[in-house]
Image (tube, rainbow, N blue to C red):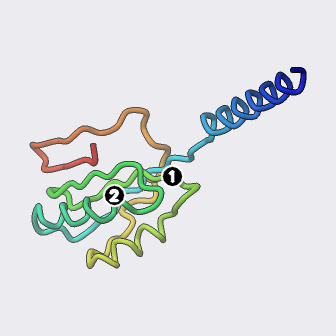
């Protein structure tokens, strides 16, 4: 009986410690604004379909009017050069618009803006 109690207690402790470590895993969210040659909504759709599934990408906003793509990503999983390679791979070479635009991600996700033509992952 004592062995069973010890085994159950050990199992519970290991489960809760694992759960705590998973829940408190820190993500380093960063935002980069990229300039890309966007001609039409099809270009935005192509970016949304492909770049959204790149490792570490958390949010993606494609603004057709300004020809900018805002990417929120986990810096622990990817970086800007990797994202630029992914854009080039789908035939949409991009460049970093402004180094000042790279900052911590805002707390609230961006909504779709139908007026400006921006679209978001969510």
Q: Secondary structure at mark 1?
A: strand
- Would you call the spot at circle 2 few (<14 residues within 10 Å), some (14-19), or many (20 or more)? some
Mark nearest the camera among 2 and 1 is 2
**Which residue, given by chain and number where applicable, does mark 1 sit on?**
74
Q: CA distance from mark 2 to mark 1?
A: 12 Å
> Based on the displayed image, in which of its 4 quarters is residue 83 positioned?
bottom left
Residue 105 in the image, given as x and y percentages of width and height = 45, 42
Q: Are marks 2 and 1 in contact (CB under 8 Å)?
A: no
> Based on the displayed image, in which of its 4 quarters is residue 48 positioned?
bottom left
- Foreground pick, 101 / 12: 12
**Which residue, given by chain and number where applicable, does mark 2 sit on?**
52
Compared across the picture, whether 60 is left or right of 15 comes to left
Whether residue 10 is situated above or below residue 93 in the rendered picture: above
Residue 77 in the image, given as x and y percentages of width and height = 55, 58
Q: How many marks?
A: 2
Give whichever of discs 2 and 1 has the lower sequence position. Answer: 2
Residue 4 in the image, given as x and y percentages of width and height = 83, 26
Q: Residue at x 48, y 48 (%)?
A: 103
Q: Secondary structure at mark 2?
A: loop
Q: Residue at x 49, y 50 (%)?
A: 30
- Would you call the spot at circle 1 few (<14 residues within 10 Å), some (14-19), or many (20 or more)? many
Whether residue 85 is situated above or below residue 60 in the rendered picture: below
Compared across the picture, whether 72 is left or right of 36 comes to right
Whether residue 102 is situated above or below residue 92 in the rendered picture: above
């Amino acid at each position: 009986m004592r062995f069973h109690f010890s085994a159950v207690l050990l199992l519970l402790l290991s489960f809760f410690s694992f759960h705590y470590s998973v829940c408190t895993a820190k993500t380093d969210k960063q935002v980069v604004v990229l300039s890309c040659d966007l001609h039409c909504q099809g270009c935005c759709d192509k970016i949304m379909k492909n770049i959204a599934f790149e490792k570490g990408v958390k949010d993606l906003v494609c603004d057709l009017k300004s020809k900018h793509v805002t990417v929120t990503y986990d810096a622990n999983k990817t970086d800007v050069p990797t994202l630029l390679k992914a854009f080039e791979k789908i035939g949409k070479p991009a460049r970093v618009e402004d180094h000042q635009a790279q900052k911590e991600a805002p707390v609230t996700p961006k909504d779709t803006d139908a007026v400006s033509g921006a679209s978001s992952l969510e």
